[in-house]
Image (tube, rainbow, N blue to C red):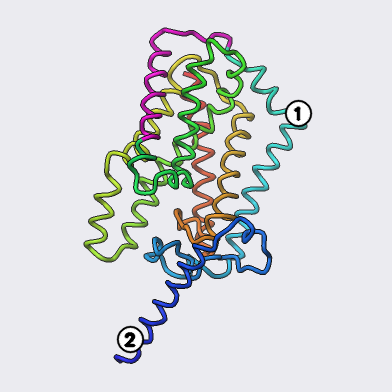
């Protein structure tokens, strides 16, 4: 038994040494080198951060069912964009439905300005005081937070610079939907999933304390508040159309490409429930589609009030 334990310990140490070496040797060229394995980090866990996940979720072949579900999802998004292009172009939909009035120095404008400065402060706080600094921007959470922040800034400028109005309208629904997905998936799916997978009581307690700190509470809970105020409650308001759905689809597809073609390959598994190595990810995709559909019609209803 002692010999077996010693062999396992040596094998684990060797695996970690290989992983450390692979991280140091990471370069852009390795992503395009077909002689390299798909998972560039041995063990599929970047610097050991994702060792708490079962090995089969970190490396190994992708599930045929999961790949089929992802392909169907992306094809649907792409097909929607093509159909809209045939009908006259996505931009035309936004231009035809552009709000006519953008007012500066009223209550809504000052509220948007305050929201913009607060969200910029949180960005700085994440960069300067977060444990990973700028690396945090690999997450969907920070992608979402960033476009909500950008839209606040564009809305502040819109009364003075008409050329930013189109961009602010294009970002309206992607900001609303991404914040909805972050709030829903993190608080009701991912967070409970990770808590269940951490078996050690001490590590679980540390995880709970860490994930409920000021910074992450802003990013995972209050994000939906800032997005909703900016995108659905302050003026100018407008109803949603299929161009908004296409814009959100492009945003989501961009992150999926980033997640599966870059993060997965270097052993960064932020959203294990979307791992293509298990057919159960199809359930996650179905849930995401349902949330996107419900999000579109839910925000449409609110904006129509």
Quadrant the N terminus occupies: bottom left
Q: Residue 228 carries which label?
A: none
Could you say which is closer to the camera, residue 169 or residue 1? 1
State which mark lies toward you, 1 or 2.
2
The dominant secondary structure in magenta is helix
**As drawn, 104 above or below 232:** above
Q: Residue 5 carries which label?
A: 2
Q: What element carries label 1?
A: loop
Q: In which quarter of the image is residue 171?
A: top right
Q: Neighbour class for label 2 at 10 Å: few (<14), some, many (≥20)?
A: few
Q: Name the residue under label 1.
A: 87
Which percent across, then down, holds residue 23?
Answer: 49, 63
**As drawn, 31 above or below 185:** below
Farthest right residue in view = 86
Which percent across, then down, holds residue 300?
Answer: 52, 26
Q: Does the magenta stretch include residue 108?
A: yes
First of labels 1, 2 by sequence position: 2
**x 35%, y 81%: residue:** 9
Could you say which is closer to the camera, residue 139 or residue 89? 139
Q: In which quarter of the image is residue 255?
A: top right
Could you say which is closer to the camera, residue 92 or residue 202? 202
**As drawn, 121 above or below 101:** below
Q: Is residue 91 magenta?
A: no
Q: Neighbour class for label 1 at 10 Å: few (<14), some, many (≥20)?
A: few
Report the span colored magenta: 100-124
Left or right side of 217 for 275: right
Marks 1 and 2, how far apart at CA: 66 Å
């Amino acid at each position: 038994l002692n010999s077996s334990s010693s062999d396992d310990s040596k094998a684990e140490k060797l695996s970690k040494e290989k992983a450390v070496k692979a991280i140091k040797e990471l370069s852009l060229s390795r992503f395009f080198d077909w002689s390299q394995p798909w998972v560039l980090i041995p063990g599929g866990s970047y610097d050991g951060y994702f060792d708490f996940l079962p090995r089969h979720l970190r490396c190994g072949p992708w599930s045929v069912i999961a790949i089929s579900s992802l392909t169907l999802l992306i094809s649907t998004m792409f097909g929607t964009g093509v159909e809209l292009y045939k009908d006259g172009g996505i931009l035309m939909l936004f231009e035809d439905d552009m709000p006519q009035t953008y007012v500066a120095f009223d209550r809504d404008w000052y509220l948007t300005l305050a929201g913009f400065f607060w969200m910029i402060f949180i960005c700085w706080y994440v960069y300067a005081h977060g444990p990973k600094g700028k690396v945090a921007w690999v997450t969907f959470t920070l992608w979402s937070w960033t476009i909500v922040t950008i839209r606040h800034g564009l809305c502040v400028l819109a009364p003075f610079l008409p050329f930013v109005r189109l961009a602010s309208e294009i970002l309206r629904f992607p900001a609303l939907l991404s914040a909805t997905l972050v709030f829903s998936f993190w608080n009701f799916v991912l967070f409970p999933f990770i808590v269940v997978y951490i078996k050690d009581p001490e590590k679980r307690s540390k995880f709970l304390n860490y994930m409920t700190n000021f910074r992450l509470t802003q990013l995972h809970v209050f994000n939906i508040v800032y997005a909703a105020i900016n995108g659905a409650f302050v003026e100018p308001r407008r109803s949603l159309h299929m161009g908004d759905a296409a814009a959100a689809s492009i945003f989501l597809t961009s992150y999926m490409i980033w997640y599966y073609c870059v993060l997965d390959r270097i052993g960064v598994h932020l959203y294990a429930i979307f791992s293509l190595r298990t057919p159960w990810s199809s359930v996650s995709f179905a849930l995401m589609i349902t949330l996107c559909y419900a999000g579109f019609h839910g925000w449409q209803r609110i904006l129509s009030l």
